[in-house]
Image: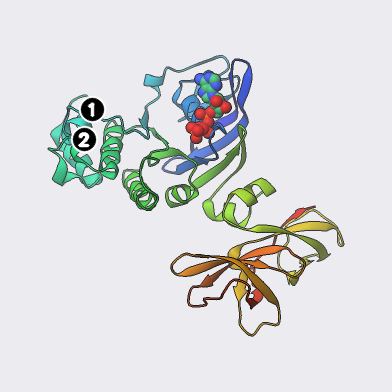
């Protein structure tokens, strides 16, 4: 059952719509994420859900109760929503345990202990915020927000002050904590790795609109439009033709896999080729020139030039160390084809 329903949401500032006709559902216990570039309206959606922004259109339903519409809204403090922000907002003069207890009316030490356990901070309960790392401070902020057992937790760029490696790890940790406590949550971020590490459902936003709301795997493998295809993961769009009900032909040959496109045979299309669709096979007669390469530890990400001048990316195990300018053998290996009408 959906705990949160956002239906046709619109928010305006001084008559300018910054969010328009945005809809999604979030089931109880699920973690959702709004992902998009700076200024696309993510925080505005989060603030509307929290009750800080009046609506210019649509409605928000939380636990079967309409909490916002154009007619009015339930006050912020009556929504049972918790929040975690990027700057942690901890009280500097309170210890870790006291910061967490702040969220509890009865300050029950047993509950504080359970929360310290949940976020793995038992050993630092008597320290002050400035004596903690950024990741630890964010876990304190999380425990404090979870203390009153919110119906819904909102996290606004919670890891943006942390370095990239730590972000992904903390994202997975926070996901485990939220799952262990059965908390429903919405995260806002511009970082795909963070979104994929944490969320069950991710919404890709641009210019105030939600382009697709789906599981991370589906977003990557079944993007609904060119924008999502370009935004999520890496890849290039190459010109192609539909040659049969399930087949397309493009510069690297014919691929016959499911083609989910409304288009007749012979029509012009574009096919999305991801770096994992192009495999390096020394003996292949199909050759491409190494234009650029990025070392990623286990893999190289090669940019390869095709005879037409088109480029593709290829993720190749890093023991295949080829020089720029070298021609290497490639094969296409895609499970299904993602294509868009040209
Ligand atoms: N209080 C406000 N008054 C006027 N315009 C606003 C206000 N708050 C946000 N905006 C505008 O609304 C648009 C969306 O802003 P929002 O903060 O929701 O984007 P965002 O995707 O969260 O960006 P970021 O990742 O940079 O925080 C922007 O153009 C912003 O300038």
> On the rendered structure, is 50 left or right of 92?
right
How far from the left and from the top, in percent, is residue 107? 17, 28
The residue located at (63%, 72%) in the rendering is 325
Q: Is residue 178 above or below residue 234?
A: above
> On the rendered structure, is 274 left or right of 130?
right
Is residue 65 visible to us here? no
The residue located at (32%, 46%) in the rendering is 177
Residue nearest the observer in this picture, 229 or 131: 131
**Mark 1 sits near ligand 1, with its Cβ under 8 Å away:** no
How far from the left and from the top, in percent, is residue 171? 38, 48
**Quadrant assignment, res 19:** top right
Residue at the disc numbered 1: 91
Number of marks present in the image shown: 2
Query: Mark 2 vs mark 1: which is more N-terminal?
Result: 1
Residue at the disc numbered 2: 129
Q: Is residue 19 above or below residue 265?
A: above
Is residue 88 visible to us here? yes
* Crowd rating for badge 1 (residues with CA inside 10 Å; few <14, some 14–19, many 20+): some
């Amino acid at each position: 059952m959906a705990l949160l329903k956002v239906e046709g949401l619109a928010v305006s500032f001084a008559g300018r719509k910054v969010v328009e006709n945005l809809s999604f559902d979030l089931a109880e216990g699920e973690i959702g994420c709004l992902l998009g570039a700076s200024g696309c309206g993510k925080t505005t959606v989060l603030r509307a859900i929290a009750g800080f922004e009046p609506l210019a259109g649509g409605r928000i339903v939380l636990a079967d109760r309409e909490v916002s519409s154009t007619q009015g809204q339930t006050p912020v403090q009556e929504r049972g929503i918790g929040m975690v922000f990027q700057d942690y907002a901890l009280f500097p003069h309170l210890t870790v345990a006291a910061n967490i207890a702040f969220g509890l009316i009865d300050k029950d030490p047993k509950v504080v202990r359970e929360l310290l356990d949940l976020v793995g901070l038992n050993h630092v309960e008597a320290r002050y915020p400035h004596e903690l790392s950024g990741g630890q401070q964010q876990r304190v902020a999380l425990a404090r927000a979870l203390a009153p057992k919110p119906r819904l937790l909102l996290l606004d760029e919670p890891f943006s002050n942390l370095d990239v490696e730590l972000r992904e790890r903390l994202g997975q940790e926070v996901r485990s904590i939220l799952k262990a406590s059965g908390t429903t949550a919405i995260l806002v971020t511009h970082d795909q790795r963070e979104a994929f590490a944490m969320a069950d459902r991710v919404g890709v936003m641009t210019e105030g609109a939600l382009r697709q709301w789906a599981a991370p795997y589906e977003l990557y493998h079944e993007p609904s439009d060119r924008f999502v295809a370009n935004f999520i993961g890496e890849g290039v769009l190459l010109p192609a033709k539909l040659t049969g009900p399930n087949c397309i032909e493009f510069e690297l040959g014919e691929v016959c896999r499911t083609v989910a496109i409304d288009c007749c045979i012979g029509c012009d299309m574009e096919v999305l080729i991801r770096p994992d669709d192009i495999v390096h096979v020394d003996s292949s007669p199909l050759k491409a020139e190494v234009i650029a390469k990025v070392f990623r530890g286990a893999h190289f990400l090669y940019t390869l030039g095709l005879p037409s001048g088109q480029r593709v990316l290829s993720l190749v195990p890093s023991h295949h160390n080829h020089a720029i300018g070298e021609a290497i053998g490639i094969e296409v290996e895609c499970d299904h084809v993602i294509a868009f009408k040209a």
